[in-house]
Image (cartoon, rainbow, N blue to C red):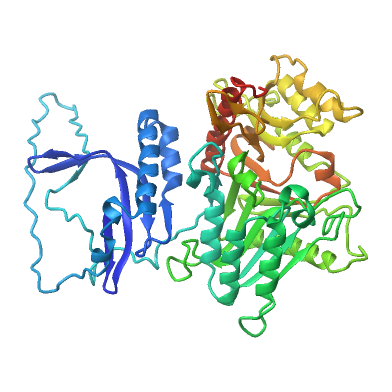
Amino acid sequence: MNAFYTNAGLRNWYVNVQHPTNRRGDGFDTFDLTVDLVVDPDLTRWRWKDEDEYAHVRRLGIITDTEHQAVDAARDQVLAMLAERSGPFADTGAWSAWRWNPAWPPRVSPQPRRPRVAAARTPGSMVAAVIKKRFLTTLLTVGLLVAGAPAATAQDETYVKTGVVFNKPTGTTAEQGAILSHLGRLVNGAPSGSSIRISLYAFGSSWLADQLVKAHQRNVNVQVLVDNTSITAEWMGTAGKTVRDKLQAAFAAQSAPGQTSWFRVCAAGRPCLAAGTSGVNHNKFFLFSRSTGSGSPTTGAVVENIVVQSSGNLTTWDRESGWNDAMTVTDNAALHAGYVRYFDLMAASQAQPDGSKTVSDLAIDVEAGQAKGYFFPRSSTDVVENILSMVETRVPNADGTAAAPVCYGNTPGHGTADGRTVIRIANGHISRPAVAEKLWKLADAGCYIDVVYGKLSDYSAVGTHRETAYWLTRSTAKGKISLHRLQNDDVTNPAAPEVSGTATHTKYLLIEGSYKGVKDQKLVFTGSHPYTGLALTANDEALLKYVGPEMHDAYVTNFRDQRAAALAESQYGGVF
């Protein structure tokens, strides 16, 4: 563990996760395992650093499964010591008061002995040396940032970047709450004068409500729209009412002239914006005009135009039983503005009890570089069916001859080993026959389709909903679509009764291969949008597209985790 200082005193504690050191005559060798823990000086807040890099080196195989298990154990150990103020955290008070003495002479490090490399005897041959991380034995245990040092300050560091956070319902408390913690750091990092907008189906986190109160009190404009379900549903208990009462009471008092914080609830029995009485405000997004993302408005660089699109509600079930994701896109003014426009339309409609500003067909798509936002309801087109249709656009051959067949034409290894497009879906509810039929046609053409689902509006359903299961279970020219049911939150492991099953609650679609006639693409479509009829035509929903290999590959890792959970839970009563 390191302590980093500035002229003002202790900046933060820094726990580096690495292999044990191997001492040598002129220093020691170690191997950094990428992920680190940054802790505030008073130990009240902490965050994991470089999770995206850790996920990347895991995918590359640089960190083995055995090392990954050791890292997980180390995470639990250090968080336990932090909670108990034990181990290296037992004497932090003394180190907090420590100061560098300018009168101390500079340390002089001995020169390491350099190994002699014999010259190559054969002309043209090369000598390669593999250099591991080596640190001199005189390296101080406590890292110092003294005046004039070139190291970046805490104000320079960027804490929030474009990427994705997943919860892990079978993991530690920290892993279960990863999305909630991420949101908390963004809320607490919002500076005075900035804005936070939230639209949710179910808001039951009193803790995040407390953070929003603090943000309001430092002159952040906080606006929250929730579905009436959050207040009235029996399964919410009193959690939604507690959040409502807490925020409405706090927002009643302005922290500064012109502040416009509010908490509003969609009318009973209908969404905020979508016309009709059969739908809900099913959104799960969070907009920040500015935030450091560090948990403090004065620590870290301020990042603008942040969109967090999640699949999860703010409830205990969503943390501990459901698999969820939260995609964050930063510094994207067009995307942020598109979401704000959608939010403002919902707010304006909610303010008219007569329903005069509701809509049946909200044909708003927001193109924003690598990102694109889709907003609902839609009555004239099925957005997901249209997305899948883009896979049917054939990739032209390099020599300009006739295009490759549908699903083919990618570089071998991109998608399948022979270059066929792969489509992966993890969605809690699929019941739109048009989507199911399109998936079957793509599978029949040669695409590899892999689906983790909760419900297919099962075989006993009547009418068109029954067709969903028919299409997804029907044989194709390449065999059957790979289906994995993950809806096991009502079962427990007999060998370990404290271990409950889980359920997929994500709503993402991953495309690895051809899209719009361009080969070797990697795309993610995620959001609050299940593939149901109500989600298309009757709900307030949002779907977010992002193009990029790192984002896609992070989702693939999560998909494989969900698929593995479906198989593991089927061993003790879960349905696979």
Q: Is residue 73 above or below residue 400?
A: below
Occupied quadrant, residue 484: top right
Instruction: State the quadrant of the C terminus.
Output: top right
Q: Percent from the top left, x then y, of residue 130?
A: 22, 34
Residue 138 seen in the current view: yes
Q: Is residue 465 left or right of residue 319?
A: right
Residue drawn where x is 86% and y is 46% of the image: 537
Q: Percent from the top left, x then y, of residue 531?
A: 77, 38
Q: Percent from the top left, x then y, of residue 363?
A: 82, 53
Q: Is residue 44 above or below residue 360?
A: below
Occupied quadrant, residue 330: bottom right
Q: Is residue 331 left or right of residue 89?
A: right
Residue drawn where x is 90% and y is 52% of the image: 277
Q: How many marks?
A: 0
Residue drawn where x is 27% and y is 65% of the image: 93
Q: Is residue 348 left or right of residue 68?
A: right
